[in-house]
Amino acid sequence: METTRRGFMGASIAASVMAKGARAAAPSDRIRIGLIGCGGISVGDTDAFLAHPECEVTAVCDVDDARIKKTIERLEKLGRKRPDAAKDFRRVVESKNVDVCVVCTPDHWHALPTIAACRAGKDVYCEKPLATTIAEGRAMRDAAREHGRICQMGTQWRSGEHYGEAVEMVRSGKIGKVRQVRCWAYLDWITDIGNPPDGPVPAGVDYDFWLGPAPERPFNKNRFHFNFRWFWDYAGGLMTDWGVHLLNIALWAMGPEWPKSVFSSGGKYALQDNSETPDTQIAVYDFPSYTLIWEHQVQSGLGPDRREHGVMFTGADATLILDDRGWEIIAEPKKRGMIEMKRVARADEKMRANHAGNFLDCVRSRKPPVENLDIGHHVSTVAHLGNLALRSGNRIDWDAGAERVTNNEAANGFAGREYRAPWKLA
């Protein structure tokens, strides 16, 4: 999503100010950051880390020279030392001047740098969703476990104060037993991106490296920066983009259960462009103790209760509705006047920095961060399952222990993917 739409700008400005005036950390406390991917999300993430005085960006990496240049210029304007630069993420992973890798690449490039960094003894902060497929997420989680690395998925809402309050309300039983959870994103800012023809690769871009393990395709500007998320080769559309944020809150509150089955319906009904992922989708998850519903629409900003996005927990005694503006508890008719509550939240400018701070604390203590890769894999897999059901055209039954669909082999084909040579997920 664009920084202006995700609320990154306020966090970035606040973090930049703090970074400029931050006290110097002792050399022994310093944490050296290797930034892999210099796109829009990297601005919010680097500012979040630089809000902590012990952090310094010592290396940056991108396949696009223009993005490397822009990132270095921005860091120097913040009064930071000029970092090393590379187009190949392996140079960052191998660097002895890097302690932590921050992976801000398109989704199809999350797995390989994260796994390589774990093997090289680096801790990793990786943007969400964890990966493009369930198999990649599992490999990332297993690498973190095997090598004893501290890894955090970048879902900053997990470190938001009012989100935590709402989750505790649900978990405490204050609204009664929850029987249904509903998550939605109705986003009127997503517009038709058109149908541009294939064209030449921009100067300074290593397009073959950008494709990496994804299938070989002619260059098309719509499949490149930012809009990559609307193409199956590189991402999972809104289901894994906004879905991971909102499903993360739902699963945080409801616990580590896995869905038993999933049904999904949707398609491209609003947009006439060359994007592939659905602009309209609904997924229904049958968990052992509750039902979860996901829905999204583009070119519509009026979701439930006229909220653009949110999570609704329906309990036996009350309903809790939550979004970035706060949360509200509405009692069932027979309970009115007893447990109605409301909490209005301001834009949490420190949420992203707090999420980075939790990760940094855990780098020092070696304790699991709040969104470690066990949790990140769980949340991302639930989002992927919605797409598996949609793309296979059928309800799917999920065996969480085996991480397999048991009734629909076509769906299992979307749980992993074949890598383009010479890249391997191993």
Image (spheres, grey):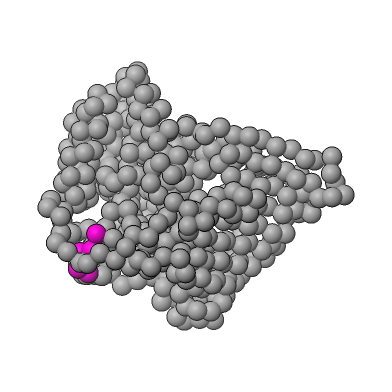
Residue at position x 61%, y 70% from top? 260
Q: Confirm whether the magenta stretch covers residue 218.
A: yes
Residue at position x 41%, y 65% from top? 271
View extreme (right): residue = 334
Residue 196 image point, x, y percent: 25, 64
Residue closer to the observer: 139 or 331: 331
Q: Confirm whether the magenta stretch covers residue 312.
A: no
Residue closer to the observer: 100 or 146: 100
Q: Is residue 410 above or below residue 130?
A: below
Quick check: can you spot residue 158? yes
Q: Main secondary structure of the magenta part?
A: loop
Q: Can you tell which quarter of the image residue 169 is in?
A: top right
Q: Can you tell which quarter of the image residue 256 is in?
A: bottom right
Q: Is residue 63 above or below residue 235?
A: above
Residue 270 image point, x, y percent: 45, 65
Quick check: can you spot residue 52? no
Q: Is residue 241 above or below residue 339?
A: below
Residue closer to the observer: 239 or 274: 274
View extreme (left): residue = 203
In this picture, residue 91 sits left or right of residue 32: left
Quarter of the picture holding the C terminus: bottom left
Which span of residues is magenta-colored? 217-221
Residue 378 image point, x, y percent: 51, 58
In this picture, residue 299 sits left or right of residue 321: left
Residue closer to the observer: 284 or 357: 284
